[in-house]
Image (cartoon, coloured by chain):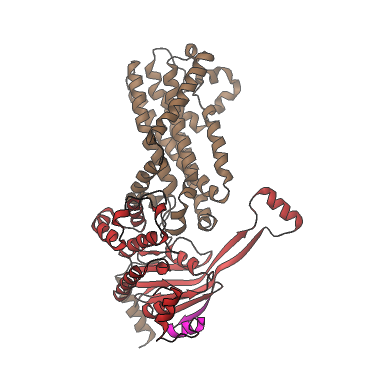
Chain colours: A brown, B red
């Protein structure tokens, strides 16, 4: 047989087969959403694993924000007398706290997700972006009941939903989901190389609490920050919090609430910024990913 | 026949770090000690496997067998060179699949099967067969962290073997199983081989390689030192010192190797 006939025979044999491809070919965020069954399993497993071995279990994800709420409510509201300055201060805090908690949970759990699942990462071939994304979805899952509590509280204060408010609500959630995933991707890969990253994230999440109008109102920023006030809104998290407050807090009080102009437009720009962060996150993750299994 | 695995000049470099904290690195730098060292776990390896071949990958501990397997599996990418595979890959790497020790056997089974590419329906159909093959019906709700190494290897092997894969990788899977289970595994791997799927089998046991494989690759310090027929490969490794095919069974048995 000549070479050409064997080549032809080979081509014929290969015709019905899947193509030769690198085994790592279909990774990345796109693959994460193509393999929805796996993603679903990871999310449900993590929901049950996050509080495994604890008596109160899932309740902890409500006790934690509730305790923070109580602290801020009494210390800031009563001792610093913000009840008088900020109308419906409880809803002001709680709507901000939901966003802050969502972001911090995503950031914290996402950063540790790769290291925590090292047994799987070291031995199984899969898109590893799966783990930070699953962490984000788990945090998002915990947001829902908190929103229900918030809505009930709002309804008692005479709140009625409005179209702009609903739009703001969704923009805020999308913004935090995208931004949180992007940062979690970046930091989860970095955390494999230096476990110090986990400690850095703990500090950052602490800063987040005070960088957004939660225990103080945007009105105070506007009045007291002077020339710094415009820069305050460059923080995407502050945008998300104010969007959330526009959705719930504004409608719950008859008094006038001070908000920045063009809230929706700002929010949409911030979503674009978050998408850029997500892109960078994916880029960093892909660059570092190759060394992850050996460094775990 | 069509190529199933094509490895061209694949190299994987590992970086060994002697120190991790800033203080240790500074001290080492001041003393002129090395802080990192690089070595090639897999060094310029090239070979082609045709569909339906069964390959025995042999070599001493630390010769790069698992690293090569991880690259074929897609857990790692080669730093240079290329690795191409055709179709679905399933298998076990270095005894025991990637299990989450805090999750139950059932949860791990589902997760593992999904990672290997099973769909929800496919898993529902095969679930009982997997549990049955592993023989772990009564331990399904126990955390995998409480399994013995043999039990978790059984579960891992059972899942991998039930995936409709085109390439099956087996890395010393049989080292920890008990005797009846080893027999069952070997029989199952024989079926895989006979069904025309590609088999990639890592083992130290000359006997089982001779029985399973049609070709042997030998790695030595990351380099491909031998590629050819089985008997010559085993001789090349000098694993056959006083072993003739006749008393091989006994030898394997004495050593507790995986027959």
Please state, as top left, top right, bottom left or bottom right, where the N terminus of chain A lies in the image.
bottom left
Tell me if residue A265 can be seen.
Answer: no
Q: Which residues are magenta?
A: B224-238
The spot of residue B27 in percent (x, y) is: 73, 52
Task: Identify which residue is drawn at 44% across, 21% down.
Answer: A92
The spot of residue B26 in percent (x, y) is: 71, 51
The quadrant where residue B123 appears: bottom left
The spot of residue A26 in percent (x, y) is: 40, 57
Left or right relative to A4: residue B19: right
On whether residue B223 falls in the magenta region, the answer is no
The quadrant where residue B172 appears: bottom left
The quadrant where residue A97 appears: top left
Viewer-closest of A202 and B140 = B140
Viewer-closest of B110 and B256 = B256
Question: Which residue is farthest left?
Answer: B125
The spot of residue B259 in percent (x, y) is: 39, 75
Question: Which residue is farthest right?
Answer: B31
Task: Identify which residue is drawn at 60% across, 66% down.
Answer: B39
Viewer-closest of A116 and A185 = A116
Task: Identify which residue is drawn at 73% across, 55% down.
Answer: B29
Question: Which residue is farthest bottom?
Answer: A1
């Amino acid at each position: 047989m000549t070479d050409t006939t064997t080549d032809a025979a080979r081509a014929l044999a290969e015709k019905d087969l899947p193509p030769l491809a690198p085994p790592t070919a279909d990774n990345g965020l796109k693959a994460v959403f193509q393999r929805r069954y796996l993603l679903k399993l990871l999310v449900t497993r993590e929901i049950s694993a996050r509080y495994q071995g604890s008596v109160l279990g899932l309740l902890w994800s409500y006790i934690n924000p509730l305790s923070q709420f109580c602290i801020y409510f009494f210390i800031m509201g009563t001792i610093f007398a913000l009840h008088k300055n900020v109308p419906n201060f409880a809803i002001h805090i709680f709507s901000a706290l939901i966003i802050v908690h969502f972001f911090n949970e995503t950031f914290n759990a996402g950063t540790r997700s790769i290291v925590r699942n090292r047994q799987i990462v070291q031995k199984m071939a899969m898109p590893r972006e799966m783990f930070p994304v699953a962490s984000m979805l788990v945090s998002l899952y915990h947001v829902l009941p908190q929103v229900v509590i918030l809505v009930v509280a709002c309804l008692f204060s005479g709140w009625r939903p409005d179209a702009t408010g609903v739009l703001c609500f969704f923009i805020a959630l999308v913004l935090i989901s995208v931004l949180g995933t992007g940062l979690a991707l970046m930091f989860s890969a970095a955390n494999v190389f230096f476990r110090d990253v986990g400690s850095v994230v703990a500090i950052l999440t602490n800063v987040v609490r005070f960088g957004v109008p939660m225990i103080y109102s945007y009105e105070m920023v506007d009045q007291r920050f002077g020339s710094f006030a415009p820069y305050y809104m460059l923080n995407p998290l502050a945008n998300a919090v104010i969007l959330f407050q526009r959705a719930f807090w504004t409608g719950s009080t008859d008094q006038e609430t001070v908000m920045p102009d063009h809230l929706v437009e700002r929010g949409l720009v911030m979503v674009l910024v978050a998408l850029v962060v997500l892109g960078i996150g994916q880029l960093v993750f892909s660059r570092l990913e190759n060394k992850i299994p050996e460094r775990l | 026949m069509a190529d199933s695995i094509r490895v061209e000049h694949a190299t994987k470099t590992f970086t060994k770090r002697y120190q991790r904290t800033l203080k240790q690195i500074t001290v080492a730098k001041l003393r002129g000690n090395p802080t990192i060292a690089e070595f090639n776990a897999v060094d310029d390896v090239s070979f082609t496997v045709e569909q339906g071949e069964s390959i025995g990958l042999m070599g001493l501990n630390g010769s790069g067998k698992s690293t090569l397997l991880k690259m074929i599996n897609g857990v790692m990418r080669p730093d240079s060179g290329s690795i191409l595979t055709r179709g679905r890959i399933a298998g076990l790497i270095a005894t025991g699949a990637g299990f989450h020790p805090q999750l139950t056997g059932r949860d791990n089974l589902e997760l593992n099967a999904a990672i290997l590419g099973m769909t929800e329906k496919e898993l529902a159909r095969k679930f009982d067969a997997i549990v049955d093959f592993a023989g772990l019906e009564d331990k399904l709700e126990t955390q995998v962290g409480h399994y013995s190494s043999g039990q978790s290897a059984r579960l891992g092997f059972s899942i991998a073997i039930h995936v409709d894969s085109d390439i099956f990788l087996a890395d010393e899977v049989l080292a920890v199983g008990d005797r009846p289970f080893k027999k069952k595994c070997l029989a199952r791997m024989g079926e895989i081989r006979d069904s025309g799927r590609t088999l990639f089998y890592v083992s130290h046991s000359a006997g089982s390689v001779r029985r399973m494989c049609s070709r042997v690759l030998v790695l030595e310090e990351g380099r491909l030192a031998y590629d050819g027929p089985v008997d010559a490969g085993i001789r090349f490794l000098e694993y056959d010192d006083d072993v003739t095919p006749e008393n091989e069974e006994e030898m394997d048995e004495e050593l507790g190797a995986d027959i």
